[in-house]
Amino acid sequence: MIQLIQNGFFCEYEMNVFMRMFFGKEDEGRVITYFSYEDNHIDAVAKIEYCGRKYEKKYNYDYKRRDDETDKIVFRCFVVRAFCDAAQNIKKVSIPWGALSGIRPAKVVRQMSEKNMTYEEIKRDLREIFGVSDEKAELAMRVCENEAEILKDVKENSASIYVGIPFCPSKCLYCSFVSNDMRVAKKYTDDYVRLLGEEIKKGAEIAERLGFNIDNIYIGGGTPTALNESQLNSVLSSLEKYFNIGRLKEFTLEAGRADTITREKLKIAKEYGVDRISINPQTMNDNTLKLVGRNHSAQMVREAFYVARDSGFKNINMDLIAGLPGENADDFKYSLDEVIKLDSENITVHSLCVKRAAKFRFSEYETADSDIMNEMLSYTQKRMRETGRNPYYMYRQKNISGNLENVGYAKKGCYSFYNVNIMEEVQNIIALGGGGTSKLVKGNRIERIFNFKDACEYIKRFDEIIDKKEEFYRIYSEM
């Protein structure tokens, strides 16, 4: 275990985030940081004792105090950067995002902008203080600019509805999401759908009591289209019955996997007002699809896309994952170019993130190295610019390959309201179904209420699910 000792300024959480990039649980050693700020001058030093050797890095920076919150961020950045630079002598780790440790880089840019900083001042701070590369700084600033179009219209009493369908045809190798394999779970999906209808009714009641205007509905999972036609119809019927669907800005259904998409399901979705769907290949390489546990081919993805177009859907998102096992940069570029040929309005590119619940952690496969990941994402940015798709929302995760990012790109007028609102934490979210997280937002205060993750637990403890909706009402009323 690596021991951390800090002097002058303490940022244990952030230091542990970056220390995990360089050291494993089995490593032994010490990291010692020193920090001082005098006469508008920062001195930050990191010393590492590891395997009988010592490594050291110093940072000196002229800095005039701004405000307490900003000052703490700046001080933290230089402590972290001193450590990372010293640790690079032990293990080379690509850190294009510098000392930015949060999951919302664009939010940092937005906060700078709200303090009336100019474009050049923001870019300078990202480079000089945070240590962000020019490419990533430009990406964060473009995301901030594009998502501003949506954020300016979010009202204080607005909310979005998330509906969780925690079922999938099978579990993918890399997946850590809440999902139940339909080969086992099929026997209790009817009970789940029936109870979900009751929770939808309760959620609508709570929204009305709080005076919320519902802007968006997002049906995610799992794979919502893993439900059969009758079950999908039942869920959509409940939403139509209890919410004013005609006033929505956006109604999204994650159709997800090509092996669950039928013309009849898409027809049902269209009839109930769904205007945005996702068809998520993750890769267009058949060998990789088989390797990660997907029971469909790339050709089935193409066919599902054509059926969706023929069914009248004019806003389609397609997800890809950079860094899937066994894939090199050329494999990923092929997938991206194949999806571009289909001309979907949205393309979301995720960097592979291996969490504890994913089977990948227990497999023989290794994640792609940072240089390959950077090549994949740089190619993505280039091709998205060339094809008129703008980055409009972005987030990062722990354990993400190459310490990189997930980015949603879309054509003008096709940005997802829900994605931006939930990522920037500016809107209330009423979550319904297994695995959902309700979010209450008032000013700078955010509270979360979690539904049970497992579908069986959701069914067995449904009374508590209803109680959680009353808890939502109580907490929001007191905020």
Image: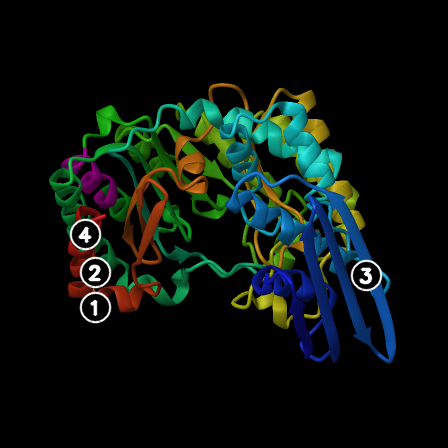
Q: Residues within 10 Å of mark 3 (few under 14, many from 20)?
A: many
Q: CA distance from mark 2 to mark 1?
A: 7 Å
Q: Is residue 139 above or below residue 98?
A: above
Q: Report if the CB atoms under discs 2 and 3 are less than 8 Å apart.
A: no
In the rendered structure, are the residues bearing label 3 and label 4 in contact, judged by CB atoms less than 8 Å apart? no
Give percent across and percent down for residue 137: 68, 34
Q: Which badge, 4 or 1, comes first in the chain's sequence?
A: 4
Q: Nearer the viewer, residue 441 or 339?
A: 441
Q: Is label 4 in contact with label 2 (beta carbons under 8 Å)?
A: yes
Residue ID for mark 4: 199
The CA distance from mark 4 to mark 1 is 12 Å
Residue at image mark 2: 465
Mark 2 vs mark 3: which is more N-terminal? 3
Scheme of colours in the image: rainbow
Task: Please give the residue where the numbered disc 3 appears in the rendered image.
Answer: 86
Mark 3 and mark 1 in contact? Answer it, CB < 8 Å.
no
* Mark 4 or mark 2: whose residue is earlier in sequence: 4
Amino acid under disc 3? Ala
Percent of width and height locating residue 164: 33, 51
Q: Which residue does the image show at 68% across and 41% down from the upper left?
A: 63
Q: Judging from the image, what secondary structure is the residue with disc 3 in?
A: helix
Residue position marked by numbered label 1 in the rendering: 461
Residue 257: percent from the left, percent from the top?
49, 46
Q: Which residues are magenta?
A: 234-243
